[in-house]
Amino acid sequence: MSGLVKDNLFRASGSIAAVAGGLSWQSVVTASTVTVSSGKGYFINTTSNACTITLPSSADEGDQIVLADYARTWGTNAITIDSNGLLFQGKTDVYIVDYDTAGQAINLVYSGSTVGWTPASDIVSALEPVAPVTQKAIFGYGTGPTAITNLVSSSGVVASDVTGVGTARSALGAATYGTDKVIFGYGNDGSANVSISNLVNNSGVVATDVTGVGTVRQSPAAASYGVDKAIFGFGEPNTAITNLVSNVGVVATDTAGVGTARTGPGASSYGEDKAIFGYGLAGSNTAVSNLVSNTGVVAADVTGVGTARRYPAAAGYGTDKGIFGFGYTSSNVSMTNLVSNVGVVAADVTGVGSARRGLGASSYGGDKAIFGYGQTSGYTGITNLVSSSGVVAADVTGVGTARGYLAAAGYSLSA
């Protein structure tokens, strides 16, 4: 027997509203079992395990207990209520009472011996945390190889070259981490593949090399996930391995590959806290994609949508969607493919702007995106802005050193 979703117990701010009689809130419960008492409130954290909650064996009319989903994980690990000999909504405790929806909070009141415990409210908070959105972007590294960077303002204006920091290289990846910082990683320094990384602070300043972690490779893709973490994945020589990046920019060792091994895919965040890898070269061009959960778990291949190609770029736009753009089939293309907030890739959209491959892309301005640089017949510095509804604008004259096979990501929460 499961409760029905009813009244909203939450204020607009997402805090729990005051309830009759007053409550004494207890420490967060992480155990698999707990016995609760009347007149108290309990945050139940089921991140690691389900929890059985035993109600008092005796109660008086008006006794009250509040249970709340501390980490929004009841949808994964449910709570089970044991009414401990008393009735629950008129049923004996032979009946199983489960609550299994993320974000639920239950206000239980004892109504007397006829009905027993009953939810005065049994609700789901719709106010899930929203990831803060980056306002600026940075393009960095690229053919030469070089280590120069170009900052992008919150209005999409690209600045002139900033002297390079770190090992000059091309064919690398970049992603936002820690909500407002960037990490560049992997690539080729002109003589060999590397796994070094360079952190970028929330002012756009690039730090010196950090010793590489994980398999050396070039042409991986990278994206943010889980609000404040990042993931590098795939790359040449063809592989499907991934490396997670913590919210303080620490790169983890290799995670065994899932999905088609390939080089030169693109990657973007979507759905506020998830990511998607798509396209790339796996012997031949492909359009397969792989979704990444908000805990960094890569899923199996999703059948490709749109034109198979390699060396596209991808970025988030509209706060919760993504866009893949440009790339190489048997020639450079400028088509794009939008990604919905549930990770569904749409059919090709006719290209706008110069066809090219090996470019970079990033979100900027909170809900927009920018494609920049890349290889046409030579290298270019042109950019194309993407609106908050995913519409790509015409070429903007290039600023900074023309180059390809660079990377880009968003930084700074301030305009």
Image: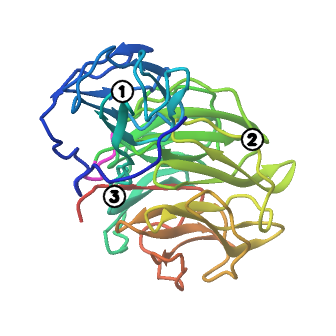
Q: Pick the quarter of the image with the C terminus.
A: bottom left
Q: Helix, strand or loop at disc 1? A: strand
Residue at numbered disc 3: 162
The amino acid type found where label 1 is placed reads Ile
Is the stretch drawn in magenta largely helix, strand or loop? loop
**Residue 334 in picture, x, y percent from top left:** 67, 76
User: 99 or 294: which is nearer to us?
Assistant: 99
Looking at marks 2 and 3 on the same chain, the residue that comes earlier in the sequence is marked by: 3
Q: Pick the quarter of the image with the N terminus.
A: top right
| Magenta residue span | 202-207
Residue 39 location, quadrant = top left
Q: Residue shown at 72%/36% (left/top)? A: 240
The amino acid type found where label 3 is placed reads Val
Residue at numbered disc 2: 300
**Residue 310 in picture, x, y percent from top left:** 74, 58
Along the horizontal axis of the image, is 301 left or right of 227? right
Along the horizontal axis of the image, is 39 left or right of 46? left
Q: Are marks 2 and 3 in contact (CB under 8 Å)?
A: no
Circle nearer the viewer, 3 or 1: 1
Q: Are marks 2 and 1 in contact (CB under 8 Å)?
A: no
Which mark identifies residue 195?
none
Q: Helix, strand or loop at disc 3? A: loop
User: 89 or 277: which is nearer to us?
Assistant: 89
Q: Residue furthest right?
A: 283
User: 199 or 179: which is nearer to us?
Assistant: 179
Residue 333 location, quadrant = bottom right
**Residue 215 in picture, x, y percent from top left:** 63, 28
In the depicted structure, whether residue 220 falls above or below residue 330: above
Residue at numbered disc 1: 44
**Residue 288 in picture, x, y percent from top left:** 77, 53
Looking at marks 3 and 1 on the same chain, the residue that comes earlier in the sequence is marked by: 1
Residue 203 magenta-highlighted: yes
